[in-house]
Image (tube, rainbow, N blue to C red):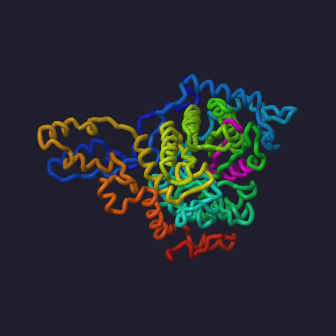
């Protein structure tokens, strides 16, 4: 059964942004042939992977399964509803046919839910502070980023966990700013040196926006803090209209307390954010077996229903709201009740959530990469790679927590970002898949080599395509054992730690306008001193 919301977009690969008529396959083929005749390689400089590479080929749910989940979701919203709705939500939903029952539950009629899904915006772009970091969360385009809100960081120097501070968040942002396979920066650390929620939100937004030119995602600890975040964005953009035209910050909102209850302050945050024009994520994050059903299908249905309820409210407040549908169901270890993000159950559950986003053709965000490991080690590697791969191949538009997180989101690791950047490059290359055309098959090249030297190492096609078709790791080691031992025999974590140190000693982003920065510092108590934002 096809979704009534689908646009009919093909799952054929979305070509890299650099692909155009003058650099397309035909001209590349001509360049290759000219290079072979002249004996000179003419490299194809397009990247092997890019933000928005097309996923969507992995489908853990059959068409009939997705339709069954959708039917269950509509029934849950229409017949069970959610409790603790705020008065503005009750007013808007009941005006469209919903009921506010005697036991305080707000129900959502099927027609309203389906109309909201059908009319939701799918055309918006999330921008960076500078051009070149655009994210299009539509179709089957895949982007990966950080996230997590961890209260602790694995100290880069001591290798031990400690409380995270504003400067740690800034360091994480400027590290991610340099890592090509991480496309956006969602706040991964809690600023624990902040004195109160308002101070926390100011310094979180500042550290993220100062540390990277990539798109930033933060949350608001209280509804009234949306105005403060808006003031900061307007100052940095040179006016609110400029920000609305090119939004470089998304507000993430966990608007429910599963099972099937609204978080009242967070619902007010939705209203405040979309009224001002912020892009938002409407997030449900129940834990299977604890705050959502133990079955994968039941946990999925509840999360989808809860996220759709947030989408309905956001669009009733502002029909032009830029909303990312974000069902992010998690898994608990049923032996202890503790969250566990590294198992195969979590990976397939999040991929199924991404597939439901494709069923509705909504801009969709998923969580993947929640390792239970405490450090970047073998457990870290297999748990993250499995979960992120499945979500990406399922076509999640934005995958958060895909890098840097440890200890079931209780910790973050700076060297982990460096390790995970390698991993993400390999995953994105697998998502890109195989493009088959006469040039790629290269029957004439095969014939030439077979009749000639008998190997392709020096052939102009190989030299021309080595950057276009292959992703090369930054810290993974491909040397023979003898060379590896001769150069110190370091494991990947040690090499990543060295690279993270080099980046943090050299890379200090300068995209903040000095006058805007001065104005923000005069207006707010910024914890990060200017002296920490330049080389020692």
Q: Residue sitting at 58 percent across and 41 percent down?
A: 364
Q: Residue sitting at 49 percent across and 41 percent down?
A: 386
Residue 361 seen from this side: no
Q: Which residues are magenta?
A: 268-291
From the image, which quarter does the N terminus lie in?
Answer: top right
**Left of 498 or right of it: where is 137?**
right
- Front-most of 407 and 536? 407
Above or below — where is 397 with respect to 160? above
Q: Residue furthest right?
A: 102
Instruction: Give the percent coordinates (x, y) of residue 476.
Output: 39, 53
Above or below — where is 366 with respect to 519? above
Q: Residue sitting at 77 percent across and 50 percent down?
A: 265
Instruction: Give the percent coordinates (x, y) of residue 296.
Output: 62, 32
Instruction: Give the percent coordinates (x, y) of residue 461.
Output: 23, 46
**Left of 250 or right of it: where is 27?**
left
Q: Which of the 4 quarters of the picture holds residue 101?
A: top right
- Front-most of 82 and 29? 82
Q: Which of the 4 quarters of the picture holds residue 314?
A: top right
């Amino acid at each position: 059964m096809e979704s009534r919301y689908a646009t009919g977009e093909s799952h054929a690969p979305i070509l890299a942004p650099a692909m155009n008529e003058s650099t397309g396959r035909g001209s590349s083929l001509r360049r290759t042939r000219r290079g072979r005749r002249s004996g000179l390689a003419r490299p194809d400089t397009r990247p092997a992977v890019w933000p928005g590479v097309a996923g969507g080929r992995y489908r853990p749910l059959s068409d009939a399964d997705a339709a069954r989940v959708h039917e269950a979701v509509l029934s849950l919203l229409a017949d069970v509803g959610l409790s603790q709705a705020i008065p503005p939500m009750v007013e808007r939903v009941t005006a469209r046919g919903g009921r506010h029952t005697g036991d305080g539950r707000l129900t959502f009629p099927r027609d309203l839910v389906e109309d909201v899904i059908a009319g939701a915006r799918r055309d918006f772009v999330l921008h960076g502070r500078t051009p070149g970091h655009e994210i299009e969360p539509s179709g089957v385009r895949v982007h990966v980023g950080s996230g997590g809100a961890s209260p602790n960081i694995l100290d880069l120097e001591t290798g031990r966990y400690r409380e995270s501070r504003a400067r740690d968040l800034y360091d994480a942002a400027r590290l991610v700013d340099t890592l090509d396979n991480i496309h956006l920066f969602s706040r991964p650390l809690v600023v624990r040196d902040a004195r109160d929620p308002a101070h926390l939100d100011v310094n979180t937004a500042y550290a993220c926006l100062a540390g990277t030119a990539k798109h930033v995602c933060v949350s608001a600890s209280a509804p009234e803090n949306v105005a403060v975040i808006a003031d900061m964005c307007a100052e940095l953009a040179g006016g609110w209209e400029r920000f609305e035209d090119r939004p470089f910050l998304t507000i993430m909102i966990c608007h429910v307390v599963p099972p099937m209850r609204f978080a009242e302050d967070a619902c007010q945050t939705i209203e405040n954010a979309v009224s001002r024009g912020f892009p938002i994520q409407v997030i449900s994050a129940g834990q299977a077996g604890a705050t959502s059903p133990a079955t994968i299908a039941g946990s999925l249905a509840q999360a989808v229903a809860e996220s759709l309820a947030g989408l309905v409210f956001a669009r009733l407040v502002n029909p032009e709201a830029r909303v990312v549908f974000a069902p992010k169901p998690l898994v608990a270890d049923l032996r202890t009740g503790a969250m566990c993000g590294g198992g195969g159950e979590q990976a397939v559950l999040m991929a199924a959530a991404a597939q439901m986003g494709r069923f509705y053709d909504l801009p969709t965000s998923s969580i993947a990469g929640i390792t239970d490991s405490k450090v970047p080690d073998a457990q870290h590697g297999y748990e993250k790679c499995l979960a992120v791969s499945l979500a990406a191949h399922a076509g999640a538009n934005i995958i958060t927590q895909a890098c840097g997180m440890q200890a079931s989101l209780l910790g973050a690791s700076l060297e982990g970002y460096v390790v995970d950047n390698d991993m993400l490059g390999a995953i994105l290359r697998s998502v890109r898949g195989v493009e088959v055309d006469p040039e790629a098959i290269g029957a004439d090249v095969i014939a030439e080599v077979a009749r000639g030297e008998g190997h392709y190492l020096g052939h102009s096609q190989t030299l021309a395509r080595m950057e276009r078709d292959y992703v090369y790791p930054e810290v993974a080691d491909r040397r023979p054992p003898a060379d590896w031992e001769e150069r110190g025999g370091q494991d990947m974590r040690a090499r990543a730690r060295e690279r993270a140190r080099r980046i943090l000693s050299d890379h200090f982003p300068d995209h903040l306008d000095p006058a805007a920065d001065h104005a923000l510092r005069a207006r707010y108590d910024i914890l990060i001193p200017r002296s920490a934002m330049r080389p020692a």
